[in-house]
Image: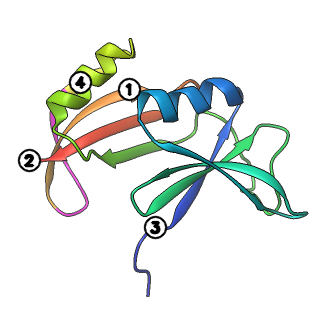
């Protein structure tokens, strides 16, 4: 019944810091679109065939999660470049790796991962297939 994830919604306390992290540090594309209830201009981070829609705490769009809060996500991304290059890019961006590289179990096979935190303290795992 379910084929793949289209998008998820991230709630942030600091929109500018969040946009900086997901675009400058992780290299996602910033998209502005009209959506929500009522329809208003919104932001999203695009990567591959997916996106992360952005909500700002206290200014969420309807419908929304029951209790949207910054810092409640634990996300794992498969990198499009080798993990060594990810680590180098994080260092260049002066973004601290809090753990890794370590071996983990991914959705389809073993993965090798590093962990960072975004500005809202969400746990972000960046991985390559092992």
Image quarter of the N terminus: bottom left
Measured Cα–Cα span from mark 4 to mark 1: 10 Å
- Looking at the image, the residue that sits furthest to the top is 94
The x, y position of residue 15, in whole percent, is: 70, 30
- Looking at the image, the residue that sits furthest to the left is 130
Measured Cα–Cα span from mark 2 to mark 4: 16 Å
| Residue on which disc 2 sits | 130
| Residue on which disc 4 sits | 87
Q: Nearer the viewer, mark 2 or mark 4?
A: 4
Visible residue check, residue 98: no
- Looking at the image, the residue that sits furthest to the bottom is 1
The x, y position of residue 33, in whole percent, is: 71, 57
Helix, strand or loop status at disc 3: loop
Seen in the picture, residue 4 relative to 81 is either above or below; the reply is below
- Residue at 69% x, 39% y is 69
The x, y position of residue 43, in whole percent, is: 68, 47
Q: Earlier in the sequence, mark 2 or mark 4?
A: 4
| Residue on which disc 3 sits | 5
| Residue on which disc 1 sits | 116
Helix, strand or loop status at disc 2: loop
Seen in the picture, residue 1 relative to 48 is either above or below; the reply is below
- Residue at 14% x, 59% y is 109
Q: Magenta span has 35?
A: no
Q: Earlier in the sequence, mark 2 or mark 3?
A: 3
Measured Cα–Cα span from mark 4 to mark 3: 26 Å
> In the rendered structure, which segment of residues is drawn in magenta?
101-108
Query: Looking at the rendered structure, which numbered label has been put on residue 125?
Result: none
Q: Are marks 2 and 3 in contact (CB under 8 Å)?
A: no
């Amino acid at each position: 019944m379910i084929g793949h994830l289209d998008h998820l919604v991230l709630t942030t306390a600091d929109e500018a810091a969040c946009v900086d992290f997901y675009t400058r540090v992780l290299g996602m594309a910033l998209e502005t679109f009209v959506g929500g209830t009522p329809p208003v201009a919104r932001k999203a981070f695009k990567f591959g065939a997916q996106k992360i829609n952005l909500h700002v705490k206290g200014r969420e769009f309807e419908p929304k999660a029951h209790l949207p809060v910054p810092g409640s996500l634990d996300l794992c991304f498969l990198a499009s470049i080798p993990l060594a290059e990810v680590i180098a890019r994080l260092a260049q961006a002066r973004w601290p790796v809090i753990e890794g590289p370590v071996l983990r179990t991914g959705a389809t096979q073993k993965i090798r991962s590093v962990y960072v935190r975004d500005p809202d303290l969400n746990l972000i795992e960046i991985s390559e297939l092992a």
